[in-house]
């Protein structure tokens, strides 16, 4: 392949319509190989910032990064959905959790108690053996469950509510915190929200992004904050890109914010530079 062909191939296999099954197979082959290589998948960490009280970094969210040997960085929005169509999602989840827990262990050894949240695919959460594998990873890294969080999307919940509730209960029994991610983009009913064993609700970036200029987005954010608090949940706003949005969220009583305004997702080595001098 010359450079142009590589580029076209990349565009096609990451495109929305998925027209070319050969490219999908190429991507799956590359992902399978990447899972046998310890250097291609890494995690970046985005700080979660407390909006009330003393503020500051109250934890981080781990976000997967794939550095393809020829194509360079491929964002998770392009490869995670492909992994999710096959059982390759299981070793991927195992890899992500292992890296995140090893990092949490490293921070503990450095005297830092930093809760780490990991995004979890529906298929991984609903896998019968998942809670036991998670327990084994916590035990082998010696990280207390309280320092780990898992984020699942609203879509996960609605795909199979009763199995999701059971799985979340088993995960929570390990002390692990649970969050609903991208809240507002799915169609979760109030009934399920009330029944779900979750600790945190994360308002989707699409509503947060224009809440200062769009009254209906602002109303959605305000009612999500109230709903979360009425259910006893912590509420997080994702995608905060400017000070005006951060101020508006604080005024609404939103507990936590994440976004480029505070910090981009960063490699662990670049995160707590000030503490390390
Ligand atoms: P998410 O969990 O909702 O993560 C938030 C996404 O928004 C991240 O994109 C993050 O880099 C981006 N972001 C954060 N702050 C801002 C901001 O202020 N403005 C804008 N425009 N974007 C912001 P990323 O890293 O590309 O991840 C995309 C999605 O891929 C994640 O959405 C999550 O659903 C999925 N994902 C990432 N890592 C993993 C993983 O390890 N496992 C699974 N299953 N899914 C993952
Ligand atoms: Mg997330
Ligand atoms: Mg999200
Ligand atoms: Mg999102």
Image: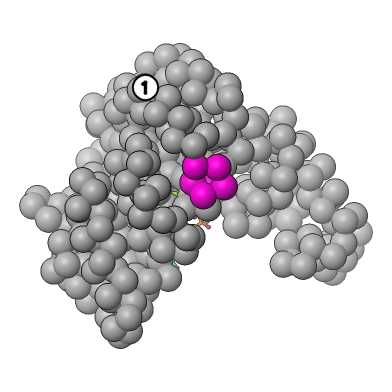
Figure colour scheme:
one colour
Q: Residue at x 29, y 51 (%)?
A: 48
Residue name at image x 56 percent, y 34 percent: 126
From the viewer's perspective, is 252 left or right of 144? left
- Main SS, magenta region, reads helix
Which image quadrant is residue 149 in? top left
Dot 1, crowdedness within 10 Å: few (<14), some or many (≥20)? some
Q: Check mark 1 vs ligand 1: CB closer than 8 Å? yes or no.
A: no
Number of numbered markers: 1
Q: Is residue 226 left or right of residue 6?
A: left
In the drawing, does residue 96 fall left or right of residue 6? left
Bounds of the magenta segment? 156-161
- Which residue is rendered at x = 32% and y = 67% of the image? 240
Is 20 drawn above or below residue 58 in the view shown? Answer: below
What residue sits right under mark 1 in the picture? 174
Seen as rendered, the residue at the extreme left is 53
Residue 155 or residue 79, whichever sits in front: 155
The quadrant of the image that shows the N terminus is: bottom right
Query: Is residue 58 in view?
Result: yes
Percent from the top left, x then y, of residue 273? 29, 45
> Mark 1: which secondary structure?
loop
The question of residue 206 being in magenta is answered with no
- Residue 62 placement (x, y as % from top left): 44, 44
Q: Nearer the viewer, residue 32 or 190?
A: 190
Q: Could you tell me which quadrant the C terminus lies in?
A: top left
The x and y percentages for residue 166 are: 46, 30
Query: Is residue 64 shown to the viewer in this render?
Result: no
Q: Is residue 249 above or below residue 86?
A: below
Using the image, determine if residue 117 lies above or below residue 181. above
Q: Is residue 16 found left or right of 61 in the rendered image?
A: right
| Frontmost residue, 182 versus 91 | 182
């Amino acid at each position: 392949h010359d450079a142009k062909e590589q580029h076209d191939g990349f565009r096609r296999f990451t495109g929305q319509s998925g027209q070319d099954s050969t490219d999908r197979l190429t991507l799956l082959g590359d992902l399978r190989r990447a899972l046998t290589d310890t250097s291609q998948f890494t995690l970046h960490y985005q700080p979660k910032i407390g909006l009330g009280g003393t503020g500051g970094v109250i934890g981080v969210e781990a976000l997967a990064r794939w550095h393809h040997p020829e194509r360079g960085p491929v964002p998770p929005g392009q490869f995670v959905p492909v992994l999710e169509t096959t059982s390759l999602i299981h070793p991927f989840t195992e890899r992500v959790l292992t890296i995140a827990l090893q990092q949490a262990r490293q921070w503990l050894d450095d005297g830092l108690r930093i809760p780490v949240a990991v995004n979890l695919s529906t298929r991984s959460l609903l896998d019968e053996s998942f809670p036991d594998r998670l327990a084994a990873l916590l035990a082998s890294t010696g990280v207390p469950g309280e320092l780990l969080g898992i984020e699942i999307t609203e879509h996960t919940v609605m795909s199979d509510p009763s199995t999701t509730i059971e799985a979340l209960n088993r995960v929570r029994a390990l002390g692990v915190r649970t969050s609903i991610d991208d809240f507002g983009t799915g169609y979760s009913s109030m009934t399920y929200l009330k029944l779900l064993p979750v600790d945190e609700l994360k308002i989707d970036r699409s509503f947060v992004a224009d809440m200062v200029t769009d009254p209906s987005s602002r109303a959605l954010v305000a009612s999500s904050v109230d709903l979360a608090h009425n259910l006893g949940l912590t509420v997080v706003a994702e995608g905060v890109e400017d000070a005006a949005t951060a101020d508006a969220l604080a005024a609404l009583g939103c507990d936590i914010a994440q976004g480029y305004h505070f910090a981009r997702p960063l490699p662990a080595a670049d995160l707590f530079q000030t503490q390390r001098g």
